[in-house]
Amino acid sequence: MEDDDTLTPDEAPQESLEARIATTITPALAAMGYEIVRVLIQGKQIPTVQIMADRADGRPIGVADCEAISHAAGAVLDVDDPFPKEWHLEVSSPGIDRPLTRTKDWLRFTGHLATAEMSIPFEGRRRFRGFILGADEESVRLKLEDGGEITLPRVDMRRAKLVLTDELIAATAAEAGADPEEDPSEDDPGVPILPKRN
């Protein structure tokens, strides 16, 4: 959450393109048993489309899953043609300190520590850090570290993510049936960036 508070002038169009790409690839990935967590576009001259995905069955996502998603999404986007020139595609799992983009993720990680950054100040602040109390489609409730509680409107939320804690590592390992002493970085597969030419 160290990013600058100011939005770049071209951020809104980029967010619209991200939403368009997510909408375009969702049917193909859903048919394969995957859910999109986030689509992010980085870079201007040669953009990289970053797709973060989960398995719909809740099992941990692996390298083979990322490769399957990459091939399917790449084929769909080659037809949709979102960029006039060369672009790259990158697929990864959400990782343990995952972004929180869906209501189901907020609810799944109730009780864990998260940070949220607002697009516009809310009650005089842009950044919040606290334990997740609950969420719905419109808002998220956090118990702040100073003991207070706050309800944040999701429509104004720029980004949010879990904070990597020992409790989160243990809970994630228990869900996956893994040893919590193992290095959590090994459970964050991804595939190499693949060049695409249009």
Image (cartoon, rainbow, N blue to C red):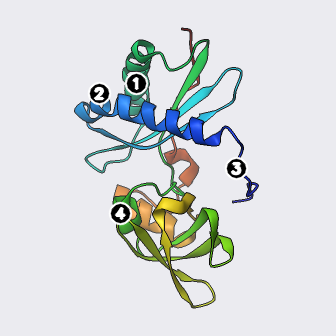
Q: Quadrant of the N terminus?
A: bottom right
Total marks shown come to 4
Q: Which residue is mark 1?
A: 73
**Mark closest to the chain's N terminus, 2 or 4:** 2
In the rendered structure, which disc, 4 or 3, sits on the residue that comes first in sequence? 3
Along the line of sight, which residue is nearer the eye, 59 or 73? 73
Disc 2 residue type (three-letter): Ala
Q: Mark 2, mark 4: which one is toward the viewer?
A: 4
Mark 1 is surrounded, within 10 Å at the Cα level, by few (under 14), some (14 to 19) or many (20 or more) other residues, namely many
Q: Amino acid at mark 3?
A: Leu
Q: Is residue 34 left or right of residue 78?
A: left
Mark 3 touching mark 1, by CB under 8 A?
no
Residue identified by numbered label 2:
28
Q: In the figure, residue 161 lies in which quadrant?
A: bottom right
Residue at 61% of width from left, 11% of height from top?
85
Checking the image for residue 137, the label placed there is 4
What residue do we see at 43% from left, 33% from top?
20
In the picture, measured across the screen, residue 75 lies left or right of residue 168, that is left
Amino acid type, label 1: Ala
Between disc 4 and disc 1, whose residue precedes? 1
Which numbered disc, 1 or 2, marks the residue that appears first in the sequence? 2
Asked if the residue under mark 2 is in contact with the one under mark 1, i.e. CB atoms within 8 Å, the reply is yes
Which residue lies under the disc numbered 3? 7
Tell me residue 2's x, y (percent).
Answer: 74, 58
N-terminal label among 3 and 2: 3
Q: Where is residue 16 shown, x and y percent of the image? A: 51, 37
**First in sequence: mark 3 or mark 1?**
3
The residues tagged by marks 2 and 4 sit, at their Cα atoms, a distance apart of 24 Å
